[in-house]
Image (cartoon, grey):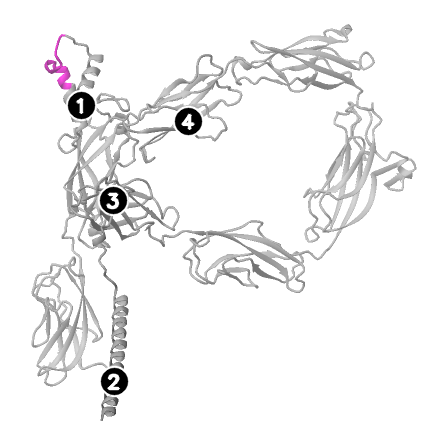
Amino acid sequence: MTPMVHLCLLALLLSSADGSSLEGKKVSFENMVVEVPEGTPVPYVLYQFQVNHPGVNGFRLTGEGSDAVKISEDGWLYLDKPLDWSHNDNYLIAVDALVDDKVAEGPIYVTINVLDVNNHAPVFNQSYYTALVRENSPAGVPFIRVFASDRDDPSTPNAQLRYSLVSQIPNRENSLLFQVDPTTGEISTSQQGEQSLTASETIQYARGEDRGVDALKAKFDDYCPAPTIPHEENPFFTCVERAEMRRRNLNPLEDPDYTLFVRVQDMGGASETALSGNTRVHIVVQPNLWVNPGRISIREHAEGSYPRIVAKVQSNDPNAVYRLVQKDRELTFPFQITEDGEILLTEELDREEKDMYILVAMAEDEYQNQVDPPMEIQVVVEDVNDNAPVCVNEESVFEVQEDEPVGSLVGQLLAHDDDEEGTLNALLTYTIVSQEPTTSLGSFAIDAASGRIQALRSLQRREHQVYKLSVRVSDPAYSADCKVVVKVIDVNNELPLFEKNDVRAHRNVCCICVCVNMCVCCGVQYGSHTLAEDVDVGHTVLSITASDADDPESGSSYIEFHISEGNDDEVFAVKTDGKGVGHLVIAKPLDFETSTSYKLKIDARNPEPLMSGLEYGSESSTYVSLSVTDVDEAPEFMLDMLDVSVLENTTKGAVLLTVEAKDPEGKEIRFKMDSDPKGWLEMDAATGQIRTKDKLDRETLETFEVKVTAFEKDNPDKYDERVVSMRLLDVNDNVPKLTERQAFICVQKPEAVFIKARDADGPPFSQPFTFAFAHGKKSHNWDLQVVDGTTAKLTLKKTPTEDKTFSLPINIKDNSGMGVTQAFDVHVCTCTELGYCYTAPAEHGFKYGLGPTIGILAGILGFCAIVFVIVIKRSRKQKKAATEERNALM
């Protein structure tokens, strides 16, 4: 049953936002929701409550917003004050119907949602910004960021901000040298700015060099000698002095090189009704002294003294400490860098050992923090002709068949030179200087550039079987003589034959005779063989033999074996030494499920071409039939490598990996898992799913391995194992924590205290940390500066008048901005000669805690009780003795 109070939505009359009438519309009595634009003029009618209960003579409102919402005696609910979304975007009102101040019906609840209206313009957090930028800074790399906020609803376009660059002053070439990211407000140089942005000329000083007026005068005199005019009266010097003072006391606000006018608009800047805000960015361009000297060329084996200066770099920080490292880690690194940035070569270079070095110059502060980005410098070692040509082979042997035509290629002599390829130092020239036997001079020619040797006449084996040549290989400065042997071999007029016999009478020959003296033979057969599918790879199935009647020790008699048919998957291979014996071996694992039989055709061939008109026939081929038998094999995993990376906050029960395996015979398999070091995981035996059964923690164990096994359900002895490598990925579930929470500073010699923090998370959720005072402002008494990614330096500015302990709230955040405020206690005290805080004896006030105090009081009371008992007993004894004495006298 619904209550008797009915809620009707009446006309939003009088001050209705859109002027439309809702009179007569009925609404359910259930909890109601109404939406009202912020700033709607009042009074603004929301509802009228109609009550069927007799005697209702009033209503009561309670709940949030009841001061802005009113109700009349006859049930009209209306706004009495305009609503502001930025103050509150939701109100919940309870309505009770009353009879003489007693609740007759209700309560019912009305939720009022305030709709945001774009009535707040975006505002920059600063009315102006100042920034420094180096000349020739790379385009797109931000050097400052402007930030604006909007009080409108961030989930609506009303607070969607877009930044734009309105103008740049000066803009002499009508080309913007800067750009602003429309989404983030980051300001960087444009492509034009990277090329054109330059700083004013300044005086350059070396590290540690005096920078006073006298030093400035001396440098001025070096460039502009004017001995007859005092510096103070020289207008050129006073101009230089003012420029130098301006550079030393940079104030971008008072004397900027450029001023940018930046605008921010809400509504994404896409509406004509968008509201906007503006700010200025004052920029000073600083000179960039950290300039790459470019590629450095150094001749190898350069004579002279070492070390010698080969280049120089200069940091933008005059106090920078230089460091030089090599990009490629080599055992020797013949370069150093001085404190002034001079790069030194410490020894002779040899291009044949290393032709290029990549140096990385670093400029750092005293805490090894980079003050300029690392700079890569290439050093190229120039070649000098210090290597003679070398023959690749001590003796090069070539074979050429007799009766080859004039100009036939005999072979190519190979030689090389270790000097730089493509230069005159490595340009080789080939020349035949001698030939044996000398009776056949002019039989060969060699190409001077390539070393190709050709026959100048048709060679005959009966004249000479071997020729020996001496070939000189020269570069512009050196030469070497290479030995060449040319063998004239017999014409390949004999075929390699398998088991040469009367072919038709051979028991292993398959022949079809079509007439009395005409048979077609398919070649020698080596019969049928049976192999189990688990035979090892490399196993020899059988040996085959063939012979060749050509001249021994020549290419014409060398026999190679090739499987030409039946070996599509290259499961088999033939190994041979070329002397007519081949061994058929298993090259890949057999698989009964893939193939149950093979019919192989094996050909015997010579590497030398056959004589013209001669072709290989069936007598140079053989056949082998192989059958594969089935073996019960173990299951096999689908993947050899199983690596899993998972977030450490993965929920309990989540599936991390499904291990897949199959049985070659199709038998049912099961899975199990072992060696889980922390017991975080479990495995479904039927599906192979690995799930989490407990909370993971990277900080406890980042990487670990588990062993999974797939086995036949009915024969567990048939199994396969794999190792699953698990890696837990970090989430930001730890905050940086102080490694020490207290320190002391001696008043006599106040030194900085170093604060260190540690975060159990890994990058990018750990260091570098930011250190700041919790209130976000600078302290009058303390200075806090970041030293490196994990350390900050705390310095006392003002010495207190008495020894005192300060509890400083330090806010430490990690690289992703997560952190908390922690107390760091610093005791400022008078120290002893050993450097420890001194505490005067009088200051040791004998103050005890509550426990010791109660113990002492109890001891005192106990002692008093004992004394009291003793006194009472003695008193009684004395009275008794006195009584006995009186009785005796009587």
Give the residue at mark 3. Answer: 831
Alpha carbon distance from label 2 to label 3: 63 Å
Q: Which residues are magenta?
A: 228-239
The amino acid beneath tag 3 is Cys
Q: Which mark is residue 244?
A: 1
Q: Is residue 323 left or right of residue 576?
A: left
Circles 2 and 1 in contact, beta carbons < 8 Å: no
- Mark 2: few/some/many CA within 10 Å (<14, 14-19, 20+): few
Q: Nearer the viewer, residue 781 or 169?
A: 781
Q: How many marks?
A: 4
Give the residue at mark 4. Answer: 359
N-terminal of the pair, mark 2 or mark 1, is 1
Give the residue at mark 2. Answer: 876
Circles 2 and 4 in contact, beta carbons < 8 Å: no
Alpha carbon distance from label 2 to label 4: 104 Å
Q: Secondary structure at mark 1?
A: helix
Q: Residue at x 39, y 18 (%)?
A: 310
For the residues carrying marks 2 and 4, which lies nearer the camera in this image? Answer: 2
Q: Secondary structure at mark 4?
A: strand
Judge whether residue 536 is colored magenta: no
Q: Residue at x 27, y 80 (%)?
A: 869
Residue 694 falls in which quadrant of the image? bottom left
Q: Secondary structure at mark 2?
A: helix
The amino acid beneath tag 2 is Arg
N-terminal of the pair, mark 1 or mark 4, is 1
Circles 2 and 3 in contact, beta carbons < 8 Å: no
Q: Is residue 312 left or right of residue 7?
A: right
Eyeballing the image, is 760 above or below 48? above
